[in-house]
Image (cartoon, rainbow, N blue to C red):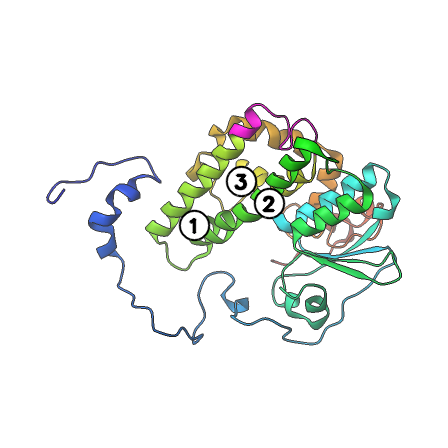
């Protein structure tokens, strides 16, 4: 109402009540041109590597190790999905899942010619399966999880409602996480300017997603039902980390402690030995003892972490 102060609601809901009345005028007007052109950096943490075109920027071949599976990745949530999956397969006795994990820093290395050949989208993770007569490339983390689950016949229910649930929650994560990372994470932590409307918009969506998960996990131990699966492996690195306040410094802001079922599920998965190992692979930040920049043998977890080899960690 004109001339009346808006009722204050708890963030992030307050902006939806007051945005139309008094928030639009706080934002400088922007009139989009008829044709957008790339004439300046977008700003923010990753501005130097953002560009509106695909393809390689330089020639660089990828290394190849001795194992059938060659992983090129970084321990972001999407990268952790695949290293956890591979470690879980090895823990189940699938020796064919032995792998070499090569570090791809997202500072421009993802635009090397060799990496672009494996993933034309220039995003980690990317996998080459060299176990057959002709190498097979697999990119996009969800696709890699399904590929490995089908290859080894593990961590994907064989049929019925549990399989449908597993794949549904897997693709839920693939569709939802961009709102968490590219939406909330970007505007809350990385954007050069704090835009209240954008932060409120994506905070509301992320809290809705947490509520979706919390309701599912109220009556189910795992996302597909009673069995741990690739659905949990896909969702946990994103929403488990969020639930523990490890993403974007946004835990308190989002009141993540309120989602009790997500917290229980997160803690259960975090205790798995394969998950602990998978989180270490291609990690370049945090405790040096938790960083295994490259993984070429199971013994590397005991002998090649950063605290043991003494190499300084570089920023992502």
Mark before the other along the chain sequence, 2 or 1: 2
Residue 99's label in the rendered image is none
Question: Which residue has dot 2 on it?
Answer: 171
**Place of residue 259 in the rendered image (x, y in percent of width and height, measured from the top left):** 50, 29
Question: Which residue has dot 3 on it?
Answer: 242
In the displayed structure, 202 sits above or below 269; it is below
Whether residue 225 is in magenta: the answer is yes
Q: Residues within 10 Å of mark 3 (few under 14, many from 20)?
A: many
Depth order, front residue of 270/146: 146
Secondary structure under the numbered disc 1 in the rendered image: helix
Mark before the other along the chain sequence, 3 or 2: 2
Q: Quadrant of the C terminus?
A: bottom right
Residue 188's label in the rendered image is 1
Number of numbered tags placed on the structure image: 3
**Place of residue 63 in the rendered image (x, y in percent of width and height, measured from the top left):** 79, 65
- Considering every residue shown, the one lying at the far top of the view is 219
Q: Is residue 290 visible?
A: no
In the displayed structure, 12 sits above or below 293; it is above
In the image: residue 285, left or right of residue 90: left
The Cα atoms of the two marked residues, 3 and 2, are separated by 19 Å
Q: Quadrant of the N terminus?
A: top left
The Cα atoms of the two marked residues, 2 and 1, are separated by 25 Å
Secondary structure under the numbered disc 2 in the rendered image: helix
Depth order, front residue of 156/303: 156
Residue at point 68%, 51% (across, down): 143
Q: Is residue 176 visible?
A: yes
Q: Nearer the viewer, mark 3 or mark 2?
A: 2
Marks 2 and 1 close (CB-CB < 8 Å): no
In the image: residue 218, left or right of residue 186: right
Q: Nearer the viewer, mark 2 or mark 1?
A: 2
């Amino acid at each position: 109402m004109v001339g009346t102060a808006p009722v204050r609601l708890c963030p992030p809901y307050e902006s939806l009540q007051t945005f139309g009345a008094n928030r639009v005028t706080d934002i400088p007007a922007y009139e989009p041109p008829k044709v957008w052109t790339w004439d300046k950096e977008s700003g923010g943490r990753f501005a130097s590597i953002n560009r509106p075109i695909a393809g390689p920027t330089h020639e660089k071949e990828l290394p190849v190790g001795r194992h059938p599976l060659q992983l090129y990745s970084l321990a972001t949530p999407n990268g952790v999905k695949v290293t956890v999956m591979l470690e879980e397969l090895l823990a189940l006795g699938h020796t064919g899942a032995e792998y070499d994990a090569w570090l791809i820093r997202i500072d421009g290395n993802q635009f090397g010619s060799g990496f672009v050949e494996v993933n034309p989208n220039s995003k980690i993770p990317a996998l080459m399966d060299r176990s057959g007569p002709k190498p097979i490339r697999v990119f996009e983390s969800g696709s890699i999880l399904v590929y490995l689950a089908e290859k080894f016949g593990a961590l994907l229910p064989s049929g019925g409602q549990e399989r449908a649930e597993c794949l549904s929650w897997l693709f839920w994560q693939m569709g939802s996480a961009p709102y968490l990372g590219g939406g909330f994470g970007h505007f809350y932590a990385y954007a050069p300017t704090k835009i209240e409307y954008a932060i409120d918009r994506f905070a509301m969506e992320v809290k809705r997603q947490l509520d979706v998960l919390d309701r599912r996990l109220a009556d189910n131990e795992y996302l597909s039902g009673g069995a741990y699966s690739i659905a949990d492996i896909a969702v946990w690195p994103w929403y488990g980390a969020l639930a523990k306040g490890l993403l974007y410094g946004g835990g308190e802001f989002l009141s993540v402690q309120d989602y009790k079922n997500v917290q229980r599920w997160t803690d259960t998965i975090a205790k798995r030995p394969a998950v602990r190992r998978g989180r270490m692979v291609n990690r370049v930040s945090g405790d040096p003892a938790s960083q295994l920049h490259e993984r070429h043998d199971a013994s590397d977890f005991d002998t090649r972490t950063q605290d043991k080899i003494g190499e300084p960690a570089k920023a992502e």
